[in-house]
Every structure is written in C-alpha cells, then in structure tokens.
C-alpha cells in the first residue's frame, strides 16, 4: 500500500490534504485557536476642562501613578480672581436684599400710618356730614373734610404701591443672590479644575504637552493605561462563536512570555462588529483581510486570566495566542 502511494505522490498529497481537512473540521467542534489576540486594559483619556497655560507638569512619559496623583496644573490666577469677584458679587447681592427688606418694613409702616390717617379722616368726614345735615356745621367744613379724606385715601394708594415696589425689589434681590451663588459655585468649580489628578492607577502613555502650552477646554493632554479590567482580546472566526460560552476554559500565551502557558476563562463575547472602518466607533472593527487571503469575519472575545504573571510588565496591544476549549 505504501509502495503504491509512493509510486503515486499526487494521490499521497491529496490524501494527506483530505485527512488534514477532515481532522480540522472535527477539531473545530472541540476548540478554537487564534494567534490574532492582544493584551488590553482600560485607557483613560485625560482632558483639560478649562483653558489656560500649563503651569506645571508633574509626570513624565511612562510614569507610574496612583489614583489621586497630580498630573498637571493650569495657571490658577485668573480663576482665583474670578472666585474673588463672584464672592464680592454675592456679598453685594445679599446686602441689596437686606436693604430691600428694610425698605419693605419702611413701606409697610408708611402704609399703616396712611391707613390710620385715612380711618381718622373717614371718621371726621362722617361726623362733619352729620353735623352739616343738622345745620351745626358749614359747607366749608364739609368740603374740607371731604378733601382730607380724599387726600388720605390717595396716600394709602401711594403707600400700597410703595410696598409692592419694595416687595418686588426683595424678589429681584433674592434672584440676584441665587445667580451670584451659582456664579460663585461655577468659579470655585473651575478653580478646582486647574489641578488635574489621575482618576485611576496606571501608567502614563507618552504625550507631547509641555509646560507653558496653552490648553483649550476639551484638549486631550495625555492618557493613562490603567490597571483596571486587564484582559486578553482574541479575534475569533465567526464559525466558532456558536460554541463559545462565558466561563469556558482558555489557554493563553503572552508575547512577553511565549513559552509560558496561562489559564483563563471567557469573560465576554462581542455582540457585533462594524463592517467598515468608516462606521462610527460604537462597535469594534476587525480587519477582515490580510495581504493575500481574505479571512472569515472575526469577532472579539474577551478573556480574563486566572492570575497575571507577577514582575512582568504588561503592554497594551502586545501579542497573545489563545486556545479556547468548548
């Protein structure tokens, strides 16, 4: 049999190819292997929330930082002056409210006095009218009492109007106090943003910002490769997806330690991928081609190692190889 195959090498090659194909098709029901995998962890982009020149850079490229460590500072003088100005505006607004409150009290006293005069004038008017009907008072006295009552009533209306104006001044002053309080809070918030600290522990990626550079609000200054959610992302062919489940055992080799096998488990499976690199970056995009061969569509599968190797630095984007057991 062997001699026959040796006399027909084409049959031997075709037979071997068919055998390998059959073995491969059988193997895909038991495991999935890919060398298209890489190390990943959360990356935090550090941006300036306010504008101004950089007055201090507290870190360098690749520096190790802890949560709360100072990264950089923006010149605080304009923002401190804004706080002082807002504080003074608030004090003035409160003083205006106190003044308006005093005016309300004064207007209320004036109204009460005018109402008392009106009451007295009304009483006098009634008495003079009665005497006039009986002939004990002249028409001149009646005209004088009528005039006094009209004047007193007009003074009451003026006092009521003054009280309303004073009350509106209190309302306006209270609104000004609220606005000044908000401005002070905003000024203090912006002052607090003149110092930028690390939100999480990690390493600072290389950056180009230097002391003296003028930053605009929203300018991306640097990035921190955090220690949070360290994982391996494997781009697995779609034919394997129906077999992959969360928690399945995975064997991983890292590019930094190619001969050391690490154990892990499947922790996440991408629900979809973008069909073109121009699509919005809401879902991941995995390049479907190589230099010569178009690969099947691949989907990112996240893998968490049971224990990351100690004493070995982990670089985001470094290569890994993955074997997933079904």
Image: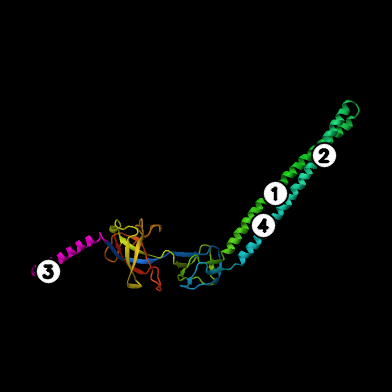
Mark 1 crowd level (few <14, some 14–19, many ≥20, 10 Å Cα): many
Q: Which residue is mark 1?
A: 170
Whether pointer 2 and pointer 1 mark residues with C-beta atoms closer than 8 Å, the reply is: no
Q: Which residue is mark 4?
A: 90
Q: Which residue is mark 3?
A: 9
Q: Where is residue 63 shown, x and y percent of the image?
A: 47, 73
Magenta run includes residue 128: no
* Quadrant position of the N terminus in the picture: bottom left
Q: Main secondary structure of the magenta part?
A: helix
Q: Residue at x 79, y 44 (%)?
A: 110
Secondary structure under badge 2?
helix
Q: Residue at x 69, y 55 (%)?
A: 94
Mark 4 and mark 2 lie on one chain; the one further toward the N terminus is 4
* Quadrant position of the C terminus in the picture: bottom left
Q: Magenta stretch? A: 1-30
Q: Seen in the image, is 197 located left or right of residue 28?
A: right
CA separation in Å, label 3 and label 4: 95 Å
Q: Which coloring applies here?
A: rainbow
CA separation in Å, label 1 and label 4: 15 Å
Asked whether residue 20 appears in the rendered view, the answer is: yes
CA separation in Å, label 3 and label 2: 130 Å
Mark 3 and mark 4 lie on one chain; the one further toward the N terminus is 3
């Amino acid at each position: 049999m062997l001699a026959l195959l040796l006399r027909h090498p084409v049959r031997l090659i075709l037979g071997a190819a068919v055998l390998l194909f059959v073995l491969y098709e059988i193997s895909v029901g038991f495991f999935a292997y890919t060398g298209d995998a890489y190390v990943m962890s959360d990356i935090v982009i550090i941006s300036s929330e306010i504008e101004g020149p950089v007055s201090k850079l507290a870190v360098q490229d690749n520096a190790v930082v802890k949560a709360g460590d100072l990264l950089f500072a923006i010149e605080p003088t304009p923002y401190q002056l804004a706080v002082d100005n807002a504080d003074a505006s608030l004090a003035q607004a409160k003083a205006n409210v106190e003044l308006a409150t005093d005016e309300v009290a004064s207007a209320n006293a004036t109204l009460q006095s005018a109402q008392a005069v009106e009451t007295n004038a009304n009483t006098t008017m009634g008495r003079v009218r009665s005497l006039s009907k009986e002939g004990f008072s002249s028409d001149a006295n009646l005209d004088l009492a009528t005039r006094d009552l009209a004047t007193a009533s007009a003074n009451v209306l003026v006092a009521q109007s003054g009280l309303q104006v004073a009350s509106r001044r209190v309302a306006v002053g209270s609104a000004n106090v609220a606005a000044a309080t908000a401005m002070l809070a905003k000024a203090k918030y912006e002052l607090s943003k003149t110092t930028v600290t690390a939100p999480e522990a990690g390493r600072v990626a290389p950056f180009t910002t230097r002391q003296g550079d003028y930053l605009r609000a929203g300018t991306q200054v640097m990035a921190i490769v955090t220690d949070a959610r360290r994982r391996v992302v494997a781009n697995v062919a779609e034919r394997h997806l129906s077999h992959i489940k969360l928690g399945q055992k995975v064997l991983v080799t890292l590019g930094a330690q190619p001969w050391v096998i690490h154990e892990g488990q499947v922790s996440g499976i991408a629900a979809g991928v973008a069909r073109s690199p121009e699509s919005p970056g809401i879902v991941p995009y995995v390049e479907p081609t190589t230099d010569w061969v178009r690969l099947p569509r691949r989907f990112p599968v996240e893998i968490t190692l049971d224990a990351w190797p100690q004493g070995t630095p982990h670089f985001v984007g470094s290569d890994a190889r993955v074997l997933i057991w079904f």
